[in-house]
Amino acid sequence: MIPVQARGQPRRSAAPLPPNAFLLRDPRRLSQAEMIVPSDIAYLISKFDGQHTIREAQVEYVRQFGTLLTTDRIGEILRQLEDAHFLDTEGFRRFEAELAEAFRALATRPAAHAARLPGQGSYPEGAGEFTRTWQERLEAVVVPGDFSPDDCRPALIAPHYDLNGAADCYAAAYGLLARAQPPDVVIILGIAHSGGESPFALTRKPFETPFGALEVDKDIVAALERAVPLDIYADELLHRDEHSVEFQAVLLHFLYREQSEPPKIVPILCGAYHRQDGEMTHPAAAGPAKAFLEALRDIVAADSRRIAVIASADLSHVGARFGQPPVNQALLELSRRHDTALLEKAQAGDADGLYAVLAEVGDRYNVCGFPAIYALLRVLQVTEGAILSYRQAVDTQTQSSVSFAAVALR
């Protein structure tokens, strides 16, 4: 549930918003439905957690607000949630299974975030408009003259924040990558924002972009299938709407659009494998995750091709939207220092130190990109790096901030 204010009312809704309201949406985006509910109903819904009966939820509501919500009204709310596929029921599980089957049947992974109509999406759907927009951005960027990416194993940390909102960071990352020899393969380490059971999720499907379909490298994927003791496709459906791999695939295809054979990709979504049962756990102790990263490291080391690795990773998420006090200058400064400490460890290739910085504060700053950065450091032997761009994007409406950076590693 996301707190919203009247000025943030979705364009699709003509009904006035109550002064304090919550927007309900499926974080996995399996259901495309959205519901806006007043704060008291949001409180009631929070009790639909599998631990309370309807009667207990009703009693909790009375205790909190001093008024009775009838059983009929609660039943109506439950039906609305069920119709929106917001409840974990047999009906929802059938719905999810149907979506998974439909996704598996697709020949390619459709572009989920392209703008099909003006004002929609994260990037232009057409190749011409995309090229005009992003060529200008890349030409405007100033890349450091004293740091060049490794020609054999170029590595980057790039944002997965909105492409337009983080355009300067993306341009800095891809402007530097353009200086290296074009890679044969790019491993994209994205983030599974919608959760999932597996520490890593792959797909074999080519990614549609404004420039066609970017092919997946079947050799590396097949080698992972053989080497890893887990089903790397168990959570393949997460790829359907996830932007963290899509944004990198689109920019890669743009960068190498004039090549007769652009680089193939290995699209990997990283789950929160540094947490077990809600507690911080060193990834080196997480069996399946450790085995996967060791296998990927060995596969990359044995491959003679030029292989780039991109960690698609945002940094701190602070403020009201993320369950914290509203963002202020002091909180921004604290999160900036935390980001700096993490990026120092990344540039030194210190995966254990990266985790130690995160664990020391219990991941207080909600660094969603940690699993991707950690994975990059375990796959490649990084010894130095350069921060190309860093920014904190402050949203005054939600009183929150997301930070991100472009970092070159070698």
Image (tube, rainbow, N blue to C red):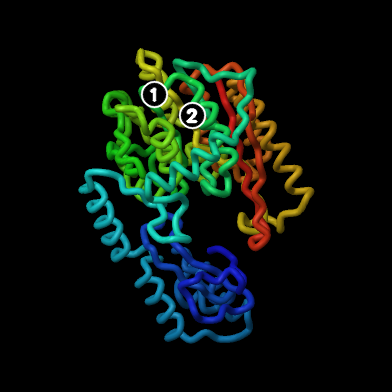
Mark 1: few, some, or many residues within 10 Å (few <14, many ≥20)?
many
**Residue at 44% from the left image edge and 60% from the top image edge:** 118
Give the answer, above or below, for where 160 lies relative to 67: above
**Residue 179 location, x and y as percent?**
51, 22
**Residue 328 location, x and y as percent?**
76, 53
Q: Disc 1, disc 2: CB below 8 Å?
A: yes
Residue 195 seen: yes
Residue 296 - label: 1
Q: Is 348 positioned to the left or the right of 28 in the image?
A: right
Q: Residue 400 versus residue 140: which sits nearer the camera?
A: 140
First in sequence, mark 1 or 2: give its number. Answer: 1
**Residue 56 location, x and y as percent?**
50, 74
**Residue at 51% from the left image edge and 43% from the top image edge:** 160
Question: What residue type is disc 1 on?
Answer: Leu
Question: What residue type is disc 2 on?
Answer: Ala
Q: Which residue is label 2 attached to? A: 375
**Residue at 59% from the left image edge and 36% from the top image edge:** 140
Mark 2: few, some, or many residues within 10 Å (few <14, many ≥20)?
many
Q: Secondary structure at mark 1?
A: helix
